[in-house]
Image (cartoon, helix red, strand yellow):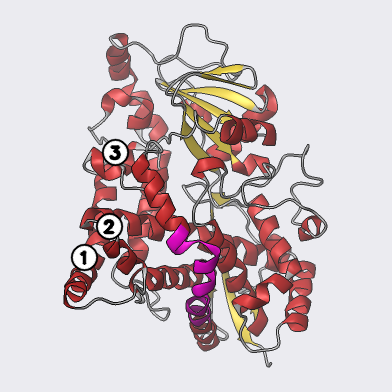
Amino acid sequence: MDQMTFSTQSHLLYPLVLLLLPLLFIILRFHKSTLPANPPLPPGPKPWPIIGNILSLGMKPHISFAKLAQVHGPLITLQLGSQIMIIGSSPKAAREILKTHDRVCSARHVPHTLHTKSPESNHMSIVWASECTEKWKYLRTICRTELFSSKAIESQANLREDKLKEMVRYLGTKEGKEVNIVEVAFATIINVVSGLCFTKDFIQLDDEKEVGGMKQHIRTIMEVGSAPNFEDYFPILNGLDVQGLHKKFLECVRSMFASWDVLIKERKEAENSEKSTPRDVLDVLLANRFSNDEINHFIFDLFVAGSDSTSSTVEWLMAELMKNPEVMGRVREELAREINSAFVRDSDLPRLSYLNACVKETWRLHPPASLVPHRALETCKIMNYTIPKGSHVCVNLWALGRDPETWEDPLTFNPSRFLDSNIDFKGNDFELIPFSAGRRICPGLPLAAALVPLIVASMVHGLDWYLPGNICATELDMNEKFGITLLKEQPLVLIPKMRKQ
């Protein structure tokens, strides 16, 4: 289903809510609300009967939450149907949720759309495990040691560099033609991940539409996963799938699993015939006796969680460079000074201090995920307010990056603010946590930290870029599209021209 359909579906949510009010009223009369009686909850807007504050969400909840925080404070309460949501919108609130009370708030609210067919399957997920079980910890350990350790990231450098060379050569064939930046970045990242997992490319860069459905499946999953779902607000409706979102999700999951089932079968047969040193993630998982279901869910998380978020950051950064020519100029000067070959290498990145500051500034203004969904395992106190057991606890990363009490001139793209700053994005500085923090911090942070500057440096080093038509850089559309990943509402389309080296 295309994006227009999902957008229309989201716009129809509120009329649909009003149509279902009588039914919901009858149902809820016989079910006790999850809202405790007169608890000292964080402040928030007064809820409407039955629907609570659902109408306050808007089409861009991260912005709505930030505006509510300006009125009610950095920790607020919303009543969404029969569910309580607590939203933190300041570094102090984020620190309390993700560090001080990390264990208590470490459960995850999993949207009903993204529940797999059997409850056991969700326990195989790194991203969407509802609790930090021993199985979840084991999966994280595999990620940390085999995929994202410093040694592993270093050993993957040749793969990343090869894929970036392919990307630059492809862009050379598009000289004078329009290029959708996020699509090129997305395909490149998918092939990096598929190379890590299967030693195989999944997408051809010169295929403008689709190869094997992988790109479309991931985009559909991100769309349905972020679409408002009645079942999240009224659990009594669980399993009805009134909006058909869960069905679409499962169709995409099955198709993605089928796309690599043959590869798993072939590798198992090869494993039985001869023993060899593991060459990719699939070999590692087979050596650790993972079942087919475990392999499917592990690799599914890597593809879905890593591709969309990293490609969107590349798009946002390229958009900011186009919108701020003086910043683009400084990036070009640094690349010309520090890079002595036609292609950028991993080993060049530590010398690109200004480009790395641009990446940080992009993550500040455009975090890959604007909201981090957690759930309270038990009742606790945060900032002197009661957080009831089972309530959804959310940190608004978008609001953290635009907090005027933390950042000078917060809405301006100014990478220089990071040149003499010790603030980093690795989960210790709560002013800037684009990958979250605590035990639920994104395990793919080291790979994203290597890929984003490498892709952007490769795009800028060998090519000049122009906006199509008569678009003025200062008028470039920078509106956001809310979702699991925070995307540009209007995809960035640019025209490349190869630069003589």
Badge 3: residue crowd in 10 Å (few <14, some 14–19, many ≥20):
some
Say which quarter of the image contains residue 278.
bottom left
Camera-side residue: 63 or 235? 235
Callouts 2 and 1 close, C-beta under 8 Å: yes
Residue type highlighted by circle 2: Asn
Of the numbered discs 3 and 2, the one sitting upstream in the chain is 3
For the magenta stretch, what is the residue range? 145-164
Camera-side residue: 391 or 244? 391
Q: CA distance from mark 2 to mark 1?
A: 8 Å
Say which quarter of the image contains residue 436.
top right
| Residue 261 falls left or right of residue 376 | left
- Residue occupying image coordinates x 67% and y 77%: 348
Numbered circle sitting on residue 261: 1
- Residue occupying image coordinates x 38% and y 27%: 233
Circle 1 — which element? helix
Q: Is residue 435 above or below residue 161?
A: above
